[in-house]
Image (tube, rainbow, N blue to C red):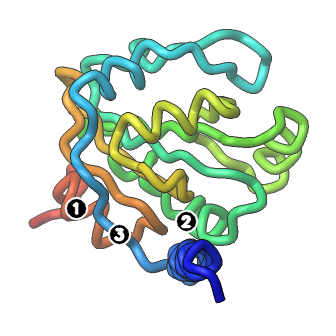
Amino acid sequence: MSRGWIYALGALLAAGALAAGLYFGYAMRVGPPDPTGSGALLRTPFTDLNGESVQLERWQGKRLVVNFWATWCAPCREEMPLLNAGRSEYAANGVEFVGIAVDQPEAVQKFVRQLGIGYPILIGGADALEVARRLGNKSGGLPFTVLVEPDGRISRTLLGQIHAEDLREWLGPPQGAGA
C-alpha cells in the first residue's frame, strides 16, 4: 500500500471518528476563535425566515447563545427543545438564543414550523460555516454553539450537542430559579 493511500485512509478514519463523536452527542472544546471572529459573527448578514437580511448586531448588549445547526443533523435536532426552553428560562437574565441554519431556506422553514421553535432562526448557508471556522470550529462540524457577551466578545464555544448543564455553566441559574 502506498504512503498516499495510508495518509488518505488515516484522514478518512479521523473524519469518521469526528463525525461519529458528533452524531452520538460527544461535545468537544475547540480552538480559540480568530480575533476577528466575533466581529464576523455580529456583522455577517444572514437571512431570517421571512427572507429579510439580519445581523446579530441587532441583539448587541445582550448575551447571545448562537447555535449553528442543520435539519439533517441528529444532535442538532435533539438539542433544539433545550434551546427553545432556554430562551424562556433565561430571558429575564438578558439572554437571547439564536439559531443559524447551514441549510436550504425551504427545509429550514418547514423544520421550524414542525418543531415550533420560538427563538430567532437565521439562514446562513456556506457563509455560516466560514463564520463558525473563524470562531474556532476548524472541522466545520455541527452543532456548534458559541456564547457572545454583551460587549461582543466570544466567551465560550462548544462543538457537539449542548446540554442543560452546559447552559447552567455558561449562563448561571435563570433569574427566579434560586441558587
Of callouts 3 and 2, the N-terminal one: 3
Q: Nearer the viewer, residue 53 or 44?
A: 44
Position of residue 28 measured from the top left corner of the image (x, y, whole percent)? 35, 69
Left or right relative to 11: residue 147: left
Element at label 1 = loop
Q: In which quarter of the image is the C terminus?
A: bottom left
Q: Nearer the viewer, residue 115 or 162?
A: 162
Query: Which dot marks residue 79?
Result: 2
Q: Which residue is drawn at 27% across and 33% down?
A: 34
Q: Which of 158 and 176 is in front in this view?
A: 158
Position of residue 71 measured from the top left corner of the image (x, y, whole percent)? 76, 55
Q: Are there few (<14), some (14-19), or many (20+) residues within 10 Å of tag 3?
A: some
Closer to us: mark 3 or mark 2? 3
| Cα distance in 3D space between marks 3 and 1 | 28 Å
Residue type at mark 2? Glu
User: Which quarter of the picture shows residue 7?
Assistant: bottom right
| Cα distance in 3D space between marks 3 and 2 | 15 Å
Does 130 sit above or below residue 5? Answer: above
Of callouts 1 and 2, the N-terminal one: 2
Q: Residue at x 38, y 34 (%)?
A: 134
Element at label 3 = loop
Q: Do residues under tags 3 and 1 come within 8 Å of each other at their CB atoms?
A: no
Of callouts 3 and 1, the N-terminal one: 3
User: Which quarter of the picture shows residue 110?
Assistant: top right
Q: Residue at x 68, y 19 (%)?
A: 47
| Cα distance in 3D space between marks 1 and 2 | 21 Å
Q: In which quarter of the image is the N terminus?
A: bottom right
Tag 3 residue: 28
Residue type at mark 1? Ala
Does 177 sit above or below residue 4? Answer: above
Query: Which dot marks residue 177?
Result: 1
Closer to us: mark 1 or mark 2? 2
